[in-house]
Image (cartoon, grey):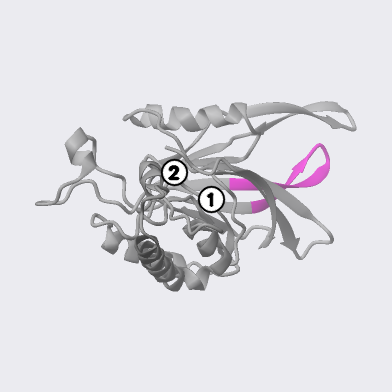
Amino acid sequence: MKTDGIFTAHNVKVEAEIGKPFKLIPFGDIHRDSDMFAHSHWQEFLAYAKAQKNAVFLGMGDYTDGVSTSERIVLSDVNLHDTTKNTLKDVYKGVTKTLVNELGWMRGRVIGLLGGNHYFDFGDQTTDHVLAAALGGKYLGVCGFIRLSIALKGTTNKSIALDIFAHHGKGGGATPAGQFGSIEKMASTADADIYLMGHTHGKGCLPSSPRIKLVSTKNGVEVRERTPWLGRTGSYLKAYESGRASYNVDAGRSACALGWIEFEITPVRVRKDGQDMIELRIRGTS
């Protein structure tokens, strides 16, 4: 796998109310133009996500099936005719337009789009850049460190931060333990509340081991606890379909985990050490 290798740090302002949850919904590994594209699961996602009135969305890469790393090497061959190259550009303009039409209602609610290892390079930009611009989200490269600066309605200048460390992904073995082990290792690179990966087409989310830290108080120090969450963000590319050839079948791999995950985030008011504080309660659903 080869991506653009770009890392970005990004701050996004969102609004929330104390006691009222909002949702973070990652989506990716769509492979929209593949013969094995899981159309019914994608339509289910679109209908569900569109109905969520208090949600923000994060793209995880691989929105199109073409073009893989090895295929981009082939397409860079100087012996390819300009006519062939221009025809392929038209094809991927069409694929991207389809995605823009399907996801257009997300505009203004997308906190950013990661790039994956499947994208078409138009020369001055890629299909990932075009999609991000059309949806009004920042293109984040293959890895984004994203802060949600959450302004709390009904309070005076109060806000709280939620940090997300997201990477399009890398492999981690065929077992759930292996796949989530790769995400757990992200914590050695960045301190975040939620760690996300796509790429393997695995799906699921779970809380990691709680972390403790010391904070200064008027009485000395106090131990505070925080539990990060880990997520593999699913896929919309089938591995098995009767009568169809698939590289997953050829390799004897397991079926892909179709669908999405989401996080419900609720700001709550708590009283500690004689002070009112705001904390974020996170619940993951797969």
Tag 1–tag 2 contact (CB < 8 Å): yes
| Amino acid carrying mark 1 in the image | Leu
Is residue 117 shown in magenta?
A: no
Principal SS element in the magenta part?
strand
Picture quadrant of residue 91: bottom left
Q: Which mark is residue 178?
A: none
- What residue is drawn where x is 30% and y is 59%? 41
x, y (%) of residue 215? 80, 30
Q: Residues within 10 Å of mark 1 (few under 14, many from 20)?
A: many
Picture quadrant of residue 227: top right
Q: Is residue 249 above or below residue 75?
A: above
- What residue is drawn where x is 53% and y is 50%? 114
User: Mark 1 = which residue?
Assistant: 114
The alpha-carbon separation of the residues under discs 1 and 2 comes to: 10 Å
Is residue 269 shown in magenta?
A: yes
Horizontally, residue 222 falls left or right of residue 192, namely right
SS for dot 2: loop
Q: Which mark is residue 198?
A: 2
- What residue is drawn where x is 58% and y is 65%? 133
Q: Residues within 10 Å of mark 2 (few under 14, many from 20)?
A: many
- Frontmost of labels 1 and 2 is 1
Horizontally, residue 98 falls left or right of residue 35, namely right
Q: Which residues are magenta?
A: 267-281
Q: Quadrant of the N terminus?
A: top left
x, y (%) of residue 143? 57, 42
